[in-house]
Image: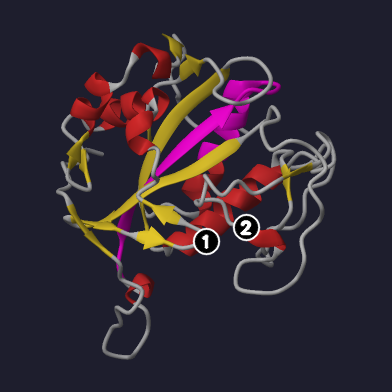
Amino acid sequence: MAFGTVGGRIRGDARRRDATGRPAWLIARVRAYVGLGSNLGDRAAHLAWARKRLAARCAEGPLEASPLYETRPLDCRGGPFVNQVAVFDTRLSPEELLDVLLDLEIRRGRVRGRPPGRSADDPPPAPGGDGVSPLLHGAVDRFDPAEPHRADAGGTRRGGTEPTQPALRPRHAARPLDLDLLAMADGGEWIERRTADLALPHPRVFERDFVLVPLLDLEPTLVVAGQPLRTALAALPATARTILRRLPVAPGPPAG
């Protein structure tokens, strides 16, 4: 699939409705940009697992994935990451897509304070089954106010008052799977969210070479919210550059 350049307009569209009063999300296809990363266990296998499930649960049509990059960790324990970006069309709202991302992280062994809801046809994982037991790697990541795209803020569930589990380990621990909702676009307009749960476009899109380079692999002339990504990449100082190498293994078909 070829992805054309999307322009710079931003909108917040929570009030958009069709003629029946349903949210426009129920009928509109939008483009989603998701960052994938892992620095624990079989990193490439974790990303392949996530791509397959994103394609099955979220994508309308094919999912396009960038090459894999090995990167040094930023503010995170453990060894180097493997990172890439996936792009696909979806009918999910930003909030719905975020819930899927959090659910996939948990299923691959990353435990957070707020387990998102699971669909009836998506049973909880068991050791040796489709997912990895959430207890495999221990503990709970704490919400970081500097990362508002995460939906476990303030010790409560998004949209509710149920308390989350206490933070049992640093949020910067190594993780088998890290999924970030980077941006979503509806035609020529970038979708904007600025809430305690979600920030779109992701505020660090323009500061991370492990996001910019894979995005430019997929769309060399991409402009997000009025900012050309190639210009943002060229402006990054050496201290902010994390990419160690492009891995020789192509993403290929999702595995597992």
Residue in view at x 19 percent, y 39 percent: 227
Which residue corresponds to the image point at 68% horizontal and 19% vertical from the top-left?
Answer: 78
The magenta region covers 28-51
Of the 4 image quadrants, the one containing the C terminus is: top right
Residue 163 point in image, percent of width and height: 77, 66
Q: Residue 105: which disc?
A: none
- Residue type at mark 1 is Ala
- Identify the residue position indicated by label 1 in the image: 196
Q: What percent of the width, then of the height, locates residue 27?
A: 32, 73
For this rendering, which residue is in front, 126 or 208?
208
Magenta segment: does it hold 194? Answer: no
**Is the image coloured rainbow, by chain, by secondary structure, or in one colour?**
secondary structure
Using the image, determine if residue 47 lies above or below residue 55.
above
Q: Is residue 92 above or below residue 80?
A: below
Q: Is residue 248 above or below residue 122?
A: above
Residue behind mark 2: 153
Specify few, some or many for label 2: CA neighbours under 10 Å numbering under 14, 14-19, or 20 or more: many
Sequence-earlier tag: 2 or 1: 2
- Looking at the rendered structure, the secondary structure element under dot 1 is loop
Residue 64 is left or right of residue 127, and the answer is left
Q: Mark 2 and mark 1: span between their CA atoms?
A: 7 Å
Marks 2/1 in contact by CB < 8 Å: the verdict is yes
| Residue sitting nearer the eye, 64 or 32 | 32
Q: Is residue 45 left or right of residue 187?
A: right
- Disc 1 crowd, CA 10 A, few/some/many (<14, 14-19, 20+): some
Which quadrant of the view contains residue 40? Answer: top right
